Image (cartoon, coloured by chain):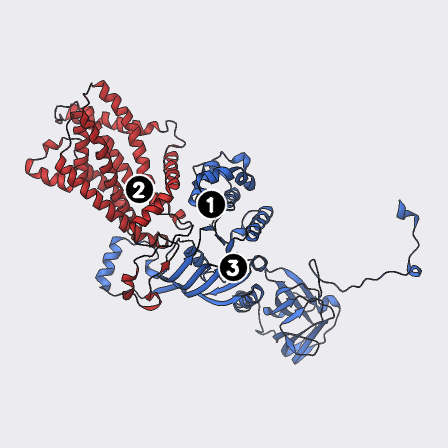
Chain colours: A blue, B red
Amino acid sequence: MKIITVDQVSKRYRLSQLGARSIREEVARLVQGGMSREKEEFYALHEISFEVDQGETLGLIGPNGSGKSTILKLLSRIIYPTGGRIVVRGSVASLIEVGAGFHPELTGHENIFLYGSIMGMKKAEVREKFDRIVEFSGLQRFIETPVKRYSSGMYVRLGFAVAAHINPKVLLVDEVLAVGDAAFQAKCQMRIEELRRNGMTIVFVSHDMSAVERLCNRVLFIDRGKIRAEGEPQSVIAEYFSTVVLRREADENAGIANGSNGSGVEIQSVRFLDRDGSIVDAIATGEQMIAQIEYNAYNSIEDPVFELFFYSADDHLHCHYSTALSGDHIPALQGPGVVQIECEEFGLTPGMFKIDALIHRRGTKEAYDWKPRQCLLKVIPGKRVRGMFYSPHRWRLLPSSERPEMGEEEFL
Amino acid sequence: MPLILSDRENERSAKLPGPEAREPVLENTIAWSDSLLAHARELFRHRELLWLVTQREIKVRYKQSVLGVLWAILQPLSLMIVMTVFFSWFARMPSDGIPYPLFVYSALLPWIFFSTSLSFAIPSLITNAHIITKIYFPREIVPLASVLAALLDFLIASAVFFLILAYYRVQLTWNLLFLLPLLAIQIAFTTGVCLLLSAFTVLYRDVRHMLPLLIQIWMFFTPILYPASVVPGRWRVVYFMLNPMAVIIDGYRRAVVQGLPPRLSYIGLAALVSCVLLWLGYKYFKHLEREFADIV
């Protein structure tokens, strides 16, 4: 059953009307512009359509300002669409900035009732769940203290504790998992997973791609107010990375990377190949990995060191290869060429990886060329692995002839 | 619980160009429809929230103050004393033969109810912007809670008033029963003004600066410090017709202190004006409500 139907929905803002007006401005505008309509319009969303099924968890991803939060606000009735049709069959609760309904002068206790009621709970319901809410927040000692004396962490914990105990048909979650300490974050994620298993329909906005991939059945990639891609999480996240993240990070790093301005060598491309030598964009865990760095040296480059970095979606360095560390010597470069690295059994686990390539002079930190986020590599499930990485290995049962003598100390 | 109501949105659709050629339809949402009855029902479903927000208003107002709710009594009482000293002893203001403290207090109490409502309710949407942009609930709850909180203050202060009445040995009559319709009319009028102006304030902040001045001027146009009888005869009709608050407050004074019924024809008119204003205010509020989160 379709719980949410969004049909051709647009949200338009007039740029000059974003703030409240004063009568003087209004009069001034009438005098100057007469009856002319303002032209500066901005579509936060442009004719978006999608549906969400009962029990589905839909992820919304996209760069900042793409319209993700606008969708949540429309679904939760905070704002009103400029056009289109929104049907939500059932009650909606939103975790958009939890604790927003708190009043600083009231105690935690009083705020639980106020906030619960704003979020649509009946008083009796709050009373019944009160102990569980307090326990979830871990704020038993401070529950009779005005929340203005709370730390920001305590504030959010109390807000989430209330919000996590509402029982709506549809739950809207906006980046709330990024709050509190690690333990509390884990608690929140567990709670959301529990609600999901109980069949609640969830719409989830996050920049944390690993959370999106883990929690969502389906993902929409929103960019500049439109749906760019829709479907199964892995492929949509890949699309998101290849269009937005790479574009942005390359821009951001353009200033840091010194490129080929005068250094004499330029990295032209990084590519991955399979066993047969054809170019691929995905490699399976535990399979052979061949990468080629194509360069062009305009001058003679002495003592070059080639390096390749594999960054995860959340920018952790997962793997790094360097000719300096492996002891491979690359002779002086002149003209165009290709350096190849081969790895018999590739150790990274499935996910999207962002690739940096670097050429620098041996023994210095001075880069000849650095191409941050040069390309993407998708690692797909291959050899079955649990844990952080795959490493080549084999098991066997030792024959008695190979068994070492058991020493006495073994029994001590 | 899904609530599917058809709304009468399509009338305006022809004027809008581009992708918004069709008016938005939100099926589980009665909040965006134009039916006031549906809005009232939605408000009724949120009555617990209205009560909690009212409690919040009161608690917050008197938190961290030693005297707490006593302020609800002290404020009109001290004003009454000051006014008695200056206007009665020094300026010899006529008071239709009623002891001046009684005379002024009987009008001051409902007036403070009115002015407190206005000064809290009208900027309330702006002071609560952080909630309005984050959570959905019927927005009229915010100004209504301010009016309700002021009403509670009024009831507390009225209790003291009856002690003063006893002290002056005022004969209470059956006309006291007029208090109930008077209060109802005043609540309707106050709510109407508050809904209208609080929504208007979201669009034009000027109202906020105008408000203290407006309340002060309005006070002089209302028989609080002086009896309505000092208004020249030919002006009195206009005076009562244009200002329902004048009729209401005059009515309170007559019913409680003078033992007279209110001026019935004027009260009828005031009741009519109040109901129309309430209806208009609610309609206007609900119409603008769609934009609150965008511009507040």
Mark 3 and mark 2 residues within 8 Å of each other at the beta carbon: no
Q: Please give left or right for residue A277 compared with residue B34 in the image.
A: right
- As drawn, the residue found furthest toward the left would be B234
Assign a secondary structure to mark 1.
Answer: loop
Image coordinates of residue A165 in percent, x first then y, are: 51, 45
The Cα atoms of the two marked residues, 3 and 2, are separated by 40 Å
Residue position for label 1: A99
Q: Nearer the viewer, residue B4 or A11?
A: B4
| Residue at 39% over, 40% down | B48
- Protein chain holding label 3: A
Q: How many labels does the image show?
A: 3
| Residue at 43% over, 58% down | A70
Q: Please give left or right for residue B67 compared with residue A301 in the image.
A: left
Q: Which amino acid does label 3 sit on?
A: Leu
Say whether disc 1 or disc 3 marks the residue closer to the N-terminus.
Answer: 3
Q: Residue A405 carries which label?
A: none
For disc 1, the neighbor class at 10 Å (few under 14, some 14 to 19, many from 20) is many
Assign a secondary structure to mark 3.
Answer: strand
Corner quadrant of residue B175:
top left
The Cα atoms of the two marked residues, 1 and 3, are separated by 24 Å
Q: Which amino acid does label 1 sit on?
A: Gly
- Protein chain holding label 1: A
Residue position for label 3: A58
The image shows residue A132, relative to residue A38, as above or below, that is above
The image shows residue B32, relative to residue B90, as above or below, that is below
Residue position for label 2: B121
- As drawn, the residue found furthest toward the bottom would be A335
For disc 2, the neighbor class at 10 Å (few under 14, some 14 to 19, many from 20) is many
